[in-house]
Amino acid sequence: MKKMWFTKYAFSGGVQELEVKPSMYAGYFKPNGSAVSYKAGKHLHEIKELAEKAVESERVKKIKSLEKQIARLKDLKVDYKAME
């Protein structure tokens, strides 16, 4: 068993340090007590610094997405006459 950092739920539950074992699929690992395997590099990271970079990258992408959504809402025109 080895320790890895799990980032899938970083925004809601934080980054977790988990003990994992290799899955039957190459490049996938299964956290202890879980029935699901995760791919190394996507949600599981062997090095803490890589996990931090992945979370920061996702945070920046989420901010950009929300800024686009805000811009669309600001430009939204509602036709109130159609509601009468």
Image (tube, helix red, strand yellow):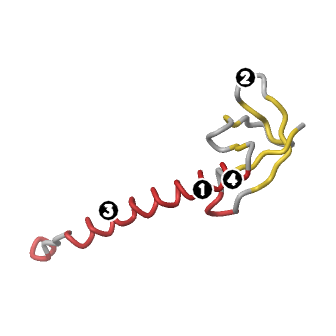
Residue 25, label in figure: 2
Q: Secondary structure at mark 4?
A: helix
Extreme residue in the left direction: 81
Mark closest to the chain's N terminus, 2 or 4: 2
Residue 69: horizontal and vertical position, in percent? 33, 64
Residue drawn at the location 70% of the way across and 43% of the way down: 44
- Mark 4 and mark 1: span between their CA atoms? 10 Å
* Numbered label tally: 4
Mark closest to the chain's N terminus, 2 or 3: 2
- Which of the 4 quarters of the picture holds residue 34? top right
Q: Nearer the viewer, mark 3 or mark 1?
A: 1
Q: Is residue 77 left or right of residue 33?
A: left
**Callout 2, which amino acid?**
Tyr
Residue drawn at the location 14% of the way across and 76% of the way down: 80
Residue 26: horizontal and vertical position, in percent? 71, 22
Q: Nearer the viewer, mark 2 or mark 4?
A: 4
Q: Which residue is mark 1?
A: 55
- Mark 2 and mark 3: span between their CA atoms? 38 Å
Q: Is residue 20 left or right of residue 7?
A: right
Q: Nearer the viewer, mark 3 or mark 4?
A: 4
Mark closest to the chain's N terminus, 4 or 1: 4
Q: Is residue 17 above or below residue 66?
A: above
Q: Which residue is mark 3?
A: 68
**Callout 1, which amino acid?**
Val
Q: Nearer the viewer, mark 2 or mark 1?
A: 1
Residue 49, label in figure: 4
**Callout 4, which amino acid?**
Glu
Q: Secondary structure at mark 2?
A: loop
